[in-house]
Amino acid sequence: MDRLGITKKTDELKRLIAKHPDYPIVILAGEGANSGDYPWMYCADIGFEIKEILDTELITDYEGEVITDRDRLEEIIEEQFYDEGLDGDELDNAVKAKVAEFDPYWVNVIVIYADNI
């Protein structure tokens, strides 16, 4: 499976936070993440958390969705098996086996959420 390419380039962020711990963290979203009316948009509503994400590209109808929940992965895989005519136990076993294939691709990350209310 292809990885998403979660960057390891956080060393600079860590260095800047350590050097300037009293500075606020500001997120500026580029055109791809905002309405496109401005080259950079200030995001006043930010949040942070440690989260587990799936570091692989799934070939599904959910292209571009970042999977941050194991239950969501299970739902997507179950939908992929839906049309195969499996009964309850067969479906459960097929879904569990496919979900297990993704175990090595779960990665803990620091997430910075950015939005404007």
Image (cartoon, helix red, strand yellow):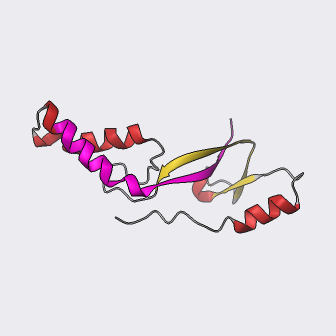
Determine the residue positioned at 31% across, 54% down: 101
Viewport quadrant of the C terminus: top right
Reply above or below: 15 against 74.
below
How far across and down, in percent of the image, does residue 90 sit? Answer: 14, 38
Look at the image and say whether residue 4 sits in the magenta stretch: no
How far across and down, in percent of the image, does residue 20 sit? Answer: 88, 59
Reply above or below: 54 against 69.
below
Q: Of residues 61 and 76, which is closer to you in this image?
A: 76
Determine the residue positioned at 34% across, 64% down: 1
- Asked where in the image residue 73 lies, by quadrant, the reply is top left
Q: Of residues 85 and 42, which is closer to you in this image?
A: 85
Determine the residue positioned at 41% across, 41% down: 70
Residue furthest top in the image? 88
Left or right relative to 111: residue 24: right
> Can residue 60 be seen here?
no
> Can residue 100 be seen here?
yes
How many marks the image carries: the answer is: 0
Region of the chain picked out in magenta, as a range: 91-117
Left or right relative to 30: residue 83: left
Left or right relative to 113: residue 104: left
Determine the residue positioned at 87% across, 54% down: 21
How far across and down, in percent of the image, does residue 103 sit? Answer: 38, 52
How far across and down, in percent of the image, does residue 34 sit? Answer: 62, 51
- Asked where in the image residue 87 lies, by quadrant, the reply is top left
- Asked where in the image residue 8 lies, by quadrant, the reply is bottom right
